[in-house]
Amino acid sequence: MSTDEYDLIVLGGGPVGENVADRAVQAGLTAVIVESELVGGECSYWACMPSKALLRSAQALRAAQHVAGAAEAVTGPLDVRAVLARRNSFTSDWSDDGQVAWLDSAGIDLVRGHGRLSGEREVTVTDADGAARVLKARHAVAVSTGTDATIPPIDGLRDAAPWTSREATSAQEIPASLAIIGGGVVGVEMATAYSGLGSAVTLIARGELLSGMDPFAGELVAEGLRTQGVDVRTHTATTRVRRDGDGVTITIGDNEEIVAAEVLAATGRTPRSGDIGLETVGLEPGKSIETDDTLLVPGTDWLYAVGDVNGRVLLTHQGKYQARAAGDVIAARAKGEDVDDGSWGRHVATADHAAVPQVVFAEPEVASVGLSAQAAEDAGYTTRVVDYDLGSVAGASLREDGYSGKARMIVDTDRDVILGVTFVGPDVADLLHAATIAVVGEVPIARLWHAVPSYPTVSEIWLRMLEAYGRDSA
């Protein structure tokens, strides 16, 4: 059994692990990534990239169909085979050669195999042939193993061989019908994608759609899905699933049965921490790994957990944000440099707590950042909620005939700063970063009046929300 030593060992070669290693190497440390699957991780091959590629073609077609002149020119149906081929190109046909080449160019070593913590600052890697190799870390080990899709304990579901997000984003054939259990982001986006690709889709949710957001977001998305022909069932329990020669039968509510060619379980994620040796360092396998804001595991001075595996925020961009902080602080501590770990400092992931941006690529899109109205109230803030009809903004009416949408701004009235913003409507993702800067920067309302939106663009919504809030209130 060979032993190798590095300054930093990273378990997991997804975008989070890549960024932790890259920041550390740029600061002068040596680093190795341990990966048992494809370098580039879930986002590159089974989540962000392929899912958005599946969604985009139908979105582009529908956008053209909602602009007079363009609508008359669009006469053919969606080419499903071309959509799938385009999706495949974004995953490089599930080859990680390009990602491996990038690691090499960045000076990051790669060890293929399953890595487990086997002691303090030690990882044992077992390759596909069963050979073991011990890696020693001079300074730190960062766990960036991500999450797996959760299969809920519904009678018969696991035996029915359900799809998870992996199968949904990598399918090479579109089923005639698809039942989706779960009303969160994955459920909503895959309902949007597969209905656009020709499947008859049923979406089953125990509560409302997108329940973690302001309620109007889920309501407008449900309306949009129904317009696309999706059978949306909210506040509906799934009690039993079985597969036979006719497909999958899903029993819901009062013993109503829905039959579909495939069923997708879209009911959340589970930390991928069950078989990585956490018990060797006194942590519980299978659970999210708690960290402080520098992503250091409490009680250690060498173990970090970065990205989805720590359960802070399950979003790729937020994981990469954590990775930059973690890589930089690992290097600073290794070199004996000052650590900037105060709120909003260089070495912390402060934004995880109340300034997280997210886009749901449904139709209509949902873009939000910061606190919902309910979350702000629960946190004890004195707030005022400003709602505005996005479709009444001139730039929106020019973008799409019959544009419909809604914007909400939650203001902390004690400080006159924005705590959260939600946009729902076509192409609202492009509005989100301005809102993120306003929330993260705690920009006073009085100063925002001087951030003049260009006319005629959808960004004029900022002026309209400020007018609704009232100059005197600022």
Image (spheres, grey):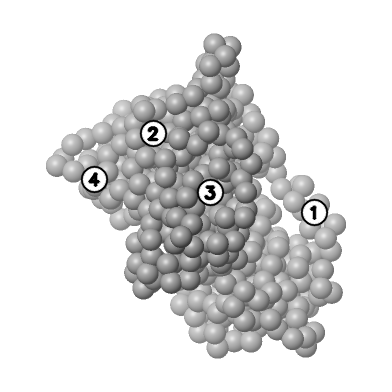
Residue at 14% in and 42% down = 254
Q: Which mark's residue is nearer the viewer, 2 or 3?
A: 3
- What is the spatial separation of the Cα atoms under label 2 and label 3, in whole angstroms? 24 Å
* Disc 2: which residue: 224
| SS state under label 3 | helix
Mark 3 residue crowding within 10 angstroms, few (<14) / some (14–19) / many (20+): many
Mark 1 residue crowding within 10 angstroms, few (<14) / some (14–19) / many (20+): some
* Disc 3: which residue: 462
Q: Is residue 165 visible?
A: no
Across and down, in percent, residue 54 comes to 55, 34
Residue nearest the observer in this picture, 21 or 336? 336
Q: Earlier in the sequence, mark 2 or mark 3?
A: 2
Is 6 positioned to the left or the right of 462 in the image? right
- What is the spatial separation of the Cα atoms under label 1 and label 3, in whole angstroms? 40 Å
Residue at 46% in and 30% down = 403
Residue type beneath disc 4: Thr
* Disc 4: which residue: 236
Residue nearest the observer in this picture, 295 or 257? 295
Q: Which mark's residue is nearer the viewer, 3 or 4?
A: 3
- What is the spatial separation of the Cα atoms under label 1 and label 4, in whole angstroms? 46 Å
Q: Earlier in the sequence, mark 1 or mark 3?
A: 1
